[in-house]
Amino acid sequence: MLRLFRCSTCDMGYIDQDSPPGVTQATMLKALVAAALVALVAADSIPDFVAPGSCAKVANQNNFDLHRYAGRWYQVQIIDIPYQPYTRCIHSDYDYDSVNGFRVTTAGFSPNNEYIRLQGKIYPTKDFPPAHMLVDFPSAFAAPYEVIETDYDSYSCVYSCIGTDNYKSEFGFVFSRTPQNSASAISRCASVFRRNGVDFSSFSAVPHTSDCVYRA
C-alpha cells in the first residue's frame, strides 16, 4: 500500500511555533506533499496516479455549512485511488465538531472480501474557504478535499488534486446519501465536474450490492 505522506499533526490551520512567521501548517503541508510528488516524478517509475497536466481550478461550494455536511455518505463514483484499501460498499460517517472539524470513519470491502475500517479527519483551515478542506487518513497522503457542490441531502461532488512541475495527482468523488438509487447524484456531479474542467470519463462506479454491510 503506497503511503506518500501522512499529516498526523495538522490542526485547524493555526500557526505552528516552529513555522516561519505568517506560514500556517496547511501551507507547509501543501509544500511538503508537493515536494513528495516531485520526488515520485523524478523516480525511475512514475506511479499510475501521477499524470502529466495541471489540477483543475474548481469552484467551491458557497456558504458551505459544515454542520449540515455531517452524517453518512456513500462513495458511488470515484477516480480510482490505488492506496485506498476498499473497492466496494464504501461508506463514511462524518462526525463534526467546531474544534477538530470532521472525524471520519470510512469502511468497505477489499478485493479479497475483507471488511476494512479506517479513521481519519477532514478539516477546514485558515488558508482556504470552508469548502476547501484537508483530508488526513493513515492509508493516504494528506491532500485537499474540495467540495465543489452539494445539496447536503442527496449528493456531494468532491475534488482532490495536488500538482507540481506539470504533473498532477488527481482524484474525484461522487458521494450520495444512499447507496442505491444514486443515479441523480451521479448525473448532477457529472455535470458539475465537466463544468469545472474535470474529465468525468475517468470516474468508475463503486459497487453497492445486496451483500454490502454498512457499519462504519
Image: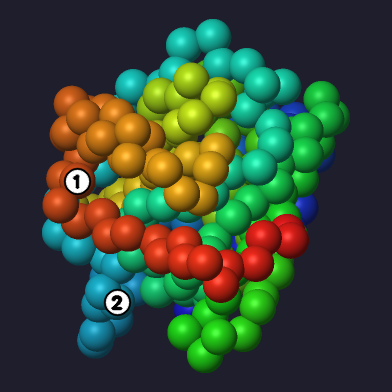
Mark 2 highlights which residue?
47
The extreme front residue here reads: 210
Q: Where residue 148 appears, x then y in whole percent?
A: 39, 27
Helix, strand or loop at label 1? It is: helix
Of the pair 9 and 201, the residue shown nearer to us: 201
Q: Is residue 93 above or below residue 42?
A: above
* Image height of 137 relative to 61, above or below: below
Residue 18 in view here? no
Residue lying furthest top: 63
**Depicted 216 relative to depicted 130: above or below:** below
Please tell me whether mark 2 sits on a helix, a strand or a loop.
Answer: loop
Residue type, numbered disc 2? Pro
- 59 to the left or right of 123: left
Colouring method of the image: rainbow
How crowded pointer 2 is (Cα within 10 Å; few <14, some 14-19, many 20+) is rated as few
Badge 2 or badge 1: first in the primary sequence: 2
- Labels 2, 1: front one: 1
Residue drawn at 55 percent across, 24 percent down: 152
Residue linked to disc 1: 200
- Between the residue at mark 2 and the residue at mark 1, the CA separation in whole angstroms equals 21 Å
Is residue 8 shown left or right of residue 97? left
Residue found 48% across the figure and 20% down from its top: 151
- Residue 161 vs residue 202, the one in the foreground: 202
Quadrant containing the C terminus in the rendered view: bottom right
Residue at x 69%, y 32% (from the top left corner): 70
Number of numbered markers: 2
- Foreground residue, 92 or 80? 92
Amino acid type of the residue tagged 1 in the rendering: Phe
